[in-house]
Amino acid sequence: MAFEDALQEATAFLQKTNVDGESVYEQLAKVVGKILDEKPEDAVDLLETSLLVKKTQYAPPDPMYATVRSKNAAAAVMFKELYKTPSPLIDPETGEPMEATPPNDFETENVVADAAMYDALGLGLSRGEMYGVMLAMKRLGEDPEKKLATVRFFGKMLGTTADYYVFESTLKEPAPAPEGETAEGEVPPEASGQGANTYTYFVCQTLGGPFTKLPDVTPATIRCARLIKRYLTGDLAADVSAYPAFPGLEADYLRAMIGRIASATVVCPAGMFTLDEETGAVNKVEEYAPGAAEDMVELDRWAHRYPHVKPQGRCEFYAAPVPEPEEGEEPAEEVEPETSPALLSTLDADAESDAIDWGAAVTAKNEEGEEVQEGRPAWASCTSSTVPGVKFPVIGIKSLVWPGAFVAYDASTGAFSNCYVGYGFKNAPFVPAPPPEIQNEFGFTPEPEPVEEGEEAPEPAEGEEVPEIPKESSELPPLPEPEPEPEEGEGEEGAEGEEPAE
């Protein structure tokens, strides 16, 4: 009995639990069970086995590692390739490296210096992202197949699933004219290299990824893009589900948004460029002197660099040919050309311009206390530092019509850079387009109103046409005449050709 009591006492002692609910008895049972299950050769080393059991009893069976999306991994690989020297092509026949094609020579801006100005103003993209933009721009411009003359970073268009890095370029050789004719009654698009299609735009979704050339813009896509507000999805081949129906895919919608933003927000210091009246080209003034920082804050020191897109959807108004009138007909009236802000016009006139389509006027009071209607400002200025006495501040001019568009100006060097980062929406209330007019129903004859016997029908109002209603007779149709009764003997015989039954 003494042995059994001692055994029970020892078992009870081993079954005592701590704060976590663990006991020596359960731990030893797990160790013994683990040894019997695995049957290791060095089963004598119970201490390490006991520690292993204790450490892994609350661990999940499979460790949960952080998953990496394949899309993010592919983007990281493409971005890494920007920093590498491209490897030469290998000749499949000889196996030796082929002679590399000389890179294309092109002109561009100092993107690294522009990134420093953006960083000083707190606008645009970060310096690290702008460095990737510079490398991507280098790859695009040096591509010998594209043959680009100039490349400029336009900005970044944000989307729901992916963003677009947009690069503005000009071609060394004119692009071929698009195939197909314009439908009758439609406004034809401007030729490549002219008007709204002066520049060719390339986009990529990831820095280091492939570039896609956007199609030329058409007046129909610009007019429809002004009537809708829709986020970009990141898929150039996606349909644009909106009302009114958009005539194209997201690539056409993106190109129309870029054309509208560029025509209204790409600016330059006033006096830096001159307009050739004969050719209409914009030429840079070689003897231009950079303005002081305190002067460049004013809007009258900045001018529009690109031509404005008219309501028709073109930079140059298109007048449809007027058909010759036939004999006895009056000649058709000529359509008056649409007006828009002149090229190289200063920004201080944007608030009073009807073509900017900014919105309602602002009610303000003049010096005499009278309320007057003033145009809302379309631009706002800012500086990199508000501390007085800073010698070389960076000046920024931000667009209030297109939030996300700005220009940065370095007073020390006179360098400036335009950029846009946003969703492509105009800062104006969205007014959905009304549905089309209701079509006329199929013509029908109205039923006459019932008139009691002895009453006169109401007379029609003056000038109202009375429809002719066919008169209906109230008499009953005549009764049919009775058929003559058969004479005696008829009908007793069988049918013709049959003998009577016996």
Image (cartoon, rainbow, N blue to C red):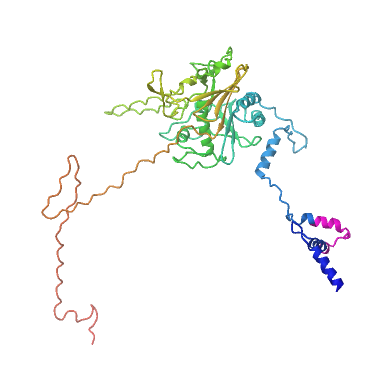
* As drawn, 492 above or below 244: below
Chief SS of the magenta region: helix
* Residue found farthest to the top: 287
Q: In which quadrant of the rendered view does residue 333 lie?
A: top left
Q: Nearer the viewer, residue 376 or 107?
A: 376
Residue 181 place in picture, x, y as percent: 47, 34
* Residue found farthest to the left: 454
Q: Is 437 part of what is drawn in magenta?
A: no
* Residue found farthest to the bottom: 502
Q: In which quadrant of the rendered view does residue 147 lie?
A: top right
Residue 286 place in picture, x, y as percent: 59, 13
Q: Position of 468 compared to 404: left or right? A: left
- Tell me the residue at 51%/16% (across/down): 276
**Residue 192 visible:** yes
Residue 209 place in picture, x, y as percent: 65, 36
Residue 453 place in picture, x, y as percent: 12, 55
- Tell me the residue at 49%/16% (across/down): 278
Q: Nearer the viewer, residue 26 or 225?
A: 26
How many discs mark residues in the rendered view?
0
Q: Nearer the viewer, residue 137 or 352?
A: 352
* As drawn, 135 above or below 451: above
* As drawn, 470 above or below 293: below
- Tell me the residue at 67%/41% (across/down): 74
Q: Is 42 part of what is drawn in magenta?
A: yes
Which part of the image, by quadrant, shows the N terminus? Answer: bottom right
Q: Position of 174 compared to 496: left or right? A: right
Q: Which residues are magenta?
A: 35-53
Q: Position of 168 compared to 73: left or right? A: left
Which part of the image, by quadrant, shows the C terminus? Answer: bottom left
Q: Position of 84 compared to 471: left or right? A: right
**Residue 106 visible:** no
* As drawn, 68 above or below 309: below
